[in-house]
Amino acid sequence: MAKNIVIRQEQPKDYQQVELLTRQAFWNLYEPGCSEHYLVHVMRSHPDFIAALDLVMTIDDQIMGNIMYTKARLVAASGDIKPILTFGPVSIAPEYQRQGFGKQLLNQSFKIAKQLGYDTIVIFGMPSNYVARGFVSAKRHQIATADGRFPAAMLVKELVPGCLKGQSWTYHDSPVMAIDAAEVEVYDQQFEPWAKRWQPSQETFNIISHATL
């Protein structure tokens, strides 16, 4: 039976469902428990949050996917500042993962981002999830962290090909990304208790997130 798939902006009535979806998608994935649902909660009220790029995907009016963007910036060796984007978390309900829905959500967000005048996206993520979506190592574009490293997990997509040529850059994300673990614990208490446990994906994430090129 055909299903009605819609991608639209998140609305206030969606907030609770989106946070639950995010918690389901990330629970025990990168650490025992997760913090992404709290990040979603605090992002919405931060000045770097971009409401036009806060998207949900629904199937027959039921939310099963979400992506959120915030502002970030690149600083060139010359001192020039380039406004860019970063996204995350990207959440797809577990029962719909690995079926192409994340690709649809990402591609729609890329179109909107370009319409808003942005030409670059920098993220921290698993390369295996994003290389097929046009992301490459940040080192290919001479984008380093503020301490001069090239993390293996730092990935870049040029929405306008060639927009990063001729410069070397440092990446600076939004302060909203620096969340407090104690605040996460307090916020999580309003949700149904779930068991925190180790699983192999956490070690994979630990290896990638600490690797440099």
Image (tube, grey):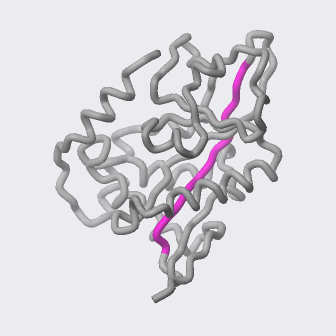
Residue appearing at x 63%, y 20% in the figure: 143
Main secondary-structure element of the magenta-colored stretch: strand
- Asked if residue 120 is positioned above or below residue 58 in the image, the reply reads above
- Asked if residue 111 is positioned above or below residue 129 in the image, the reply reads below
Residue 71, image quadrant: top right
- Asked if residue 165 is positioned above or below residue 58 in the image, the reply reads above
Which image quarter holds the N terminus? Answer: bottom left
In this picture, residue 113 sits left or right of residue 67 = right
> x%, y% of residue 160?
78, 38
Residue appearing at x 58%, y 37% in the figure: 135
Which residue is nearer to you in this view: 191 or 4?
A: 4
> x%, y% of residue 44?
59, 55
Residue appearing at x 77%, y 21% in the figure: 165
Residue appearing at x 59%, y 54% in the figure: 106
Q: Which residues are magenta?
A: 63-75
Residue 20, visible in the rendered structure: no
In this picture, residue 84 sits left or right of residue 106 = right
Which residue is nearer to you in this view: 92 or 97?
A: 97
